Amino acid sequence: MELQDKLKFFAAAALVVAGISVFYFLPETQGVLRVLSVILGVVLAAGLLLTSQPGKNFVIYGQESLAEAKKVVWPTRKEASQLTGLVFLFVVVLAAFMWLVDSGLSWLFYDVILQRG
């Protein structure tokens, strides 16, 4: 990372700290101004970070991600409902199987091996 980008990161951090500092220096009666100072500090810091090379790379990554998300073929409502039903059925069958295994092992150890039943 270049020195210029590092300076932008430090300046952005300083903007956020300044916004938070103004929040605590303003009286509590100025609630809206206090919140706006933090929001302004964060927005200015984000704007400054977007001018750095990592920020530009992040914007390009976001644009490419949106383009890829538009290519996704989503299932129809019927397909989604069928798959959801299949998942619920699998969960019920697995729960019944686990209950049978647990009950069987419990019977085996307590009644047969330990003879406490």
Image: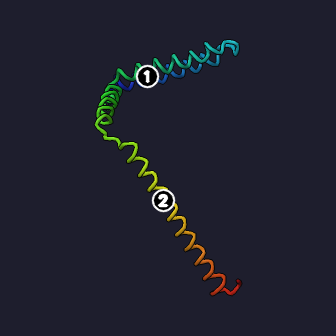
Q: Which residue is mark 2?
A: 89
Check if mark 2's residue and mark 1's residue have beta carbons within 8 Å. Answer: no
Task: Measuring from the top left, give residue 46's x and y in whole percent.
Answer: 43, 22
Q: Residue furthest front?
A: 78
Q: Please, is residue 64 above or below residue 19 in the view? A: below
The amino acid pointed to by label 1 is Ala
Q: Which residue is mark 1?
A: 46
Which residue: 56% across, 15% down? 37
| Sequence-earlier tag: 2 or 1 | 1
- For the C terminus, give its image quadrant: bottom right
Depth check, front residue: 74 or 10: 74
Q: Please, is residue 65 above or below residue 112 in the view? A: above
Snapshot quadrant of residue 61 = top left
Snapshot quadrant of residue 86 = bottom left
The amino acid pointed to by label 2 is Leu
Task: Measuring from the top left, give residue 95's x and y in whole percent.
Answer: 54, 64
Task: Measuring from the top left, give residue 91's x and y in whole percent.
Answer: 50, 60
Snapshot quadrant of residue 66 = top left
Which residue: 63% across, 80% down? 107
- Image-based side of 23 in relation to 87, left or right: right
Depth check, front residue: 115 or 31: 115
| Residue 62: image tag | none
- For the N terminus, give its image quadrant: top left
Circle 1 residues within 10 Å: few <14, some 14–19, many ≥20: some
Q: Secondary structure at mark 2?
A: helix
Calculate the distance from the C-alpha at mark 2 to the C-alpha at mark 1.
47 Å
Circle 2 residues within 10 Å: few <14, some 14–19, many ≥20: few
Depth check, front residue: 63 or 72: 72
Depth check, front residue: 116 or 2: 116
Q: How is the image coloured?
A: rainbow
Q: Secondary structure at mark 1?
A: helix
Q: Please, is residue 16 above or below residue 82 in the view? A: above
